[in-house]
């Protein structure tokens, strides 16, 4: 059940970023943590994590020098 929720959230994240941006390649390399509690992804050169249950993404790195 946790994997299903994580995949649903991951799909939602991908679709929301893809539809909200003109360049869907900005969200890259999503990965689910081994315990299934977190989803990590790269967006515009920064790393983020979000709970598999949903919620706001937490920035793990901040880099204003994105060269997409």
Image (cartoon, rainbow, N blue to C red):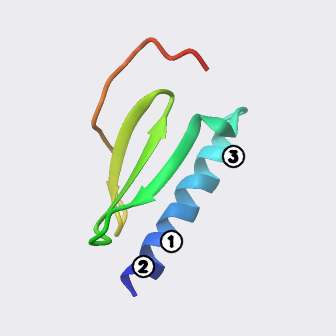
Question: What residue appears at the point 69 percent right and 46 percent down from the top-left corner?
Answer: 19
Mark carried by residue 3 = 2
On the image, which quarter does residue 28 sit in?
Answer: top right
Q: Position of residue 17 (x, y in %)?
A: 59, 45
In the image, is 58 to the left or to the right of 66? Answer: left
**Residue picked out by circle 1:** 7
* CB contact under 8 Å: marks 1 and 2: yes
Q: Which structural element holds mark 3?
A: helix
Upstream in the sequence, badge 2 or badge 3?
2
Q: Position of residue 23 (x, y in %)?
A: 70, 33
**Label 2: how many Cα within 10 Å (few below 14, some 14–19, many 20+):** few
Above or below: residue 43 compared with residue 2: above
Q: Which structural element holds mark 2?
A: helix
Which of the image's four quarters has the C terminus? top right
Q: Which structural element holds mark 1?
A: helix
Q: Position of residue 6 (x, y in %)?
A: 43, 71
Question: What residue appears at the point 47 percent right and 27 percent down from the top-left corner?
Answer: 45
Q: Which tag is nearer the camera, tag 2 or tag 3?
A: 2
Q: CA distance from mark 2 to mark 3?
A: 24 Å
Q: CA distance from mark 1 to mark 2?
A: 6 Å
Above or below: residue 24 compared with residue 35: above
Mark carried by residue 18 = none
**Residue picked out by circle 3:** 19
In the image, is 1 to the left or to the right of 58? Answer: right
Q: Which residue is outermost to the top?
A: 65
* CB contact under 8 Å: marks 2 and 3: no
* CB contact under 8 Å: marks 3 and 1: no
Question: What residue appears at the point 58 percent right and 63 percent down from the top-left corner?
Answer: 11
């Amino acid at each position: 059940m946790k994997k299903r929720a994580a995949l649903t959230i991951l799909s939602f994240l991908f679709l929301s970023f893809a539809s909200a941006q003109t360049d869907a390649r900005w969200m890259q390399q999503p990965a689910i943590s081994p315990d299934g509690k977190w989803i990590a992804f790269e967006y515009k050169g920064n790393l983020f994590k979000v709970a598999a249950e949903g919620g706001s993404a937490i920035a793990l790195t901040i880099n204003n020098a994105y060269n997409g």
